[in-house]
């Protein structure tokens, strides 16, 4: 794991004196690329944290799925349903267990209270995270991009050495602000601004984020079933729940795309869509997804937390069967 401080040094140097292009390039952070698995939070059958599963979970992602980055305590991890204290304990465990095995641990720190978000941002920094992600508050929603930028600025300032990713997920936050508007001028307010996790379906908005991004920033797409379209628009990588159990498959898709094999990439994307089309008949949500991951990986992830309700075992089993039929090699 690496703490990226160099781009922020570069920025301050830029203001104080000239730097040669070679020196500049060597100081820029490594851009986050490839797959980032949005992890589930392991709970006991009583609904308490089960930190003992996190070590084996990291090994499963690294060894079985070829995934080298994780996004923890986000949507998939039910971060908003955990207490601040629980979020700190899980973040610490993920950072500890990922050491030497993952390239990046990004901790989602968004909360409804800005004080909690700042507390978690600061905590992520001390826990050794490689970055933080923040969603828009969703009860009192920011009415303007300006208001959201002010909020993000304040949260990011609590973790001044960590790359900061704006997490855009309008279907869940209920915010109607375009990500490309939110990101406008954000680097001036947030020196650590390193990219966007874009979990929306508006590809024009995504395209505008890419178009106006800077070279060191990472545009990470978050609707796994249509990643290929986002790659065409210039996505640098992807954050999502499906990379938990389809990481190797999606790595092939990334490879096919990089090699210009669009027909191959499309076939790989279509098989994922087939699985999702099947699963959505059962109301595919985090609860079903979590049980599916338990069934496929053998890790005991436990139930979801209320207000999500556990899925019926037959539902996850039916989706797992479909998965095995579509991806016999996985
Ligand atoms: C709403 C939601 O959970 N979105 C995830 C990421 O943001 C995705 O990874 C989806 O789980 C995935 O694309 C399946 O729809
Ligand atoms: C899916 C995703 O990116 C999240 O869990 O936040």
Image (cartoon, rainbow, N blue to C red):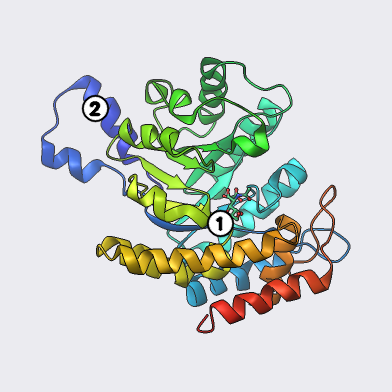
Q: Position of residue 298 (x, y in %)?
A: 68, 78
The quarter of the displayed image where residue 311 is located:
bottom right
User: According to the image, label 2 marks what residue?
Assistant: 13
Counting other residues with Cα less than 10 Å from the Cα at mark 1, is it few (<14), some (14-19), or many (20 or more)? Answer: many
- Give the farthest residue toward the right: 46
* Residues under numbered marks 1 and 2 in contact, where contact means CB atoms less than 8 Å apart: no
The quarter of the displayed image where residue 100 is located:
bottom left
Q: Let me know if residue 194 appears in the view.
A: yes
Q: Position of residue 215 (x, y in %)?
A: 27, 39
Quick one: SS at disc 1?
helix
- Quarter of the image with the N terminus in it: bottom left
User: According to the image, label 1 marks what residue?
Assistant: 95
The quarter of the displayed image where residue 136 is located:
top right
Q: Is residue 271 above or below residue 237?
A: below
Query: In the drawing, does residue 84 fall left or right of residue 121?
Result: right
Quick one: SS at disc 2?
helix
Mark 2: is the Cβ under 8 angstroms from ligand 2? no
Q: Position of residue 158 (x, y in %)?
A: 54, 30
Residue located at (31% from left, 33% from top): 211
Q: Is residue 88 above or below residue 270?
A: above
Residue located at (78% from left, 66% from top): 302
Q: Is residue 38 above or below residue 250?
A: above
Q: Which mark is residue 286?
A: none
Residue located at (51% from left, 34% from top): 159
Query: In the drawing, does residue 261 fall left or right of residue 87?
Result: left
Mark 1: is the Cβ under 8 angstroms from ligand 2? no
Counting other residues with Cα less than 10 Å from the Cα at mark 2, is it few (<14), some (14-19), or many (20 or more)? Answer: few
| Residue nearest the viewer, comparing 150 with 249 | 249
Q: Let me know if residue 163 appears in the view.
A: no
Q: Which mark is first along the chain, 2 or 1?
A: 2
Q: Position of residue 208 (x, y in %)?
A: 37, 32
| Residue nearest the viewer, comparing 138 with 256 | 256
């Amino acid at each position: 794991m690496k703490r990226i401080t160099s781009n922020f040094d570069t920025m301050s140097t830029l203001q104080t004196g000239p730097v040669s292009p070679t020196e500049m390039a060597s100081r820029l952070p490594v851009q986050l690329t490839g797959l980032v698995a949005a992890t589930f939070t392991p709970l006991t059958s009583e609904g308490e944290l089960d930190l003992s599963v996190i070590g084996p979970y990291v090994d499963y992602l690294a060894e079985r799925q070829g995934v080298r980055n994780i996004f923890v305590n986000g949507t998939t991890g039910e971060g908003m349903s955990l207490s601040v204290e629980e979020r700190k304990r899980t973040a610490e465990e993920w950072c500890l267990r990922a050491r030497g095995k993952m390239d990046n641990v990004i901790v989602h720190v968004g909360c409804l209270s800005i004080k909690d978000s700042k507390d978690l941002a600061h905590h992520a920094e001390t826990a050794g995270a490689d970055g933080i992600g923040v969603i828009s508050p969703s009860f009192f929603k920011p009415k303007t991009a300006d208001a959201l930028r002010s909020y993000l600025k304040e949260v990011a300032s609590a973790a001044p050495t960590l790359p900061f990713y704006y997490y855009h997920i309008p279907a869940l936050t209920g915010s109607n602000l375009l990500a490309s508007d939110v990101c406008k001028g954000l680097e001036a307010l947030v020196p650590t601004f390193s990219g966007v996790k874009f979990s929306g379906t508006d590809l024009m908005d995504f395209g505008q984020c890419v178009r106006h991004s800077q070279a060191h920033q990472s545009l990470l797409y978050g609707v796994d079933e249509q990643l290929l379209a986002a790659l065409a628009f210039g996505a640098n990588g992807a954050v999502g729940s499906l990379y938990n159990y389809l990481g190797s498959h999606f790595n092939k898709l990334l490879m096919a795309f990089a090699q210009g094999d669009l027909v191959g990439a499309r076939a790989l994307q279509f098989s994922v869509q087939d699985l999702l089309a099947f699963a959505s008949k059962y109301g595919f949500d985090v609860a079903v997804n979590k049980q599916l991951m338990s069934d496929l990986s053998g890790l005991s992830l436990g139930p979801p937390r209320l207000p999500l309700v556990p899925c019926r075992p037959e539902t996850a089993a039916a989706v797992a069967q479909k998965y095995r039929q579509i991806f016999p090699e996985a």
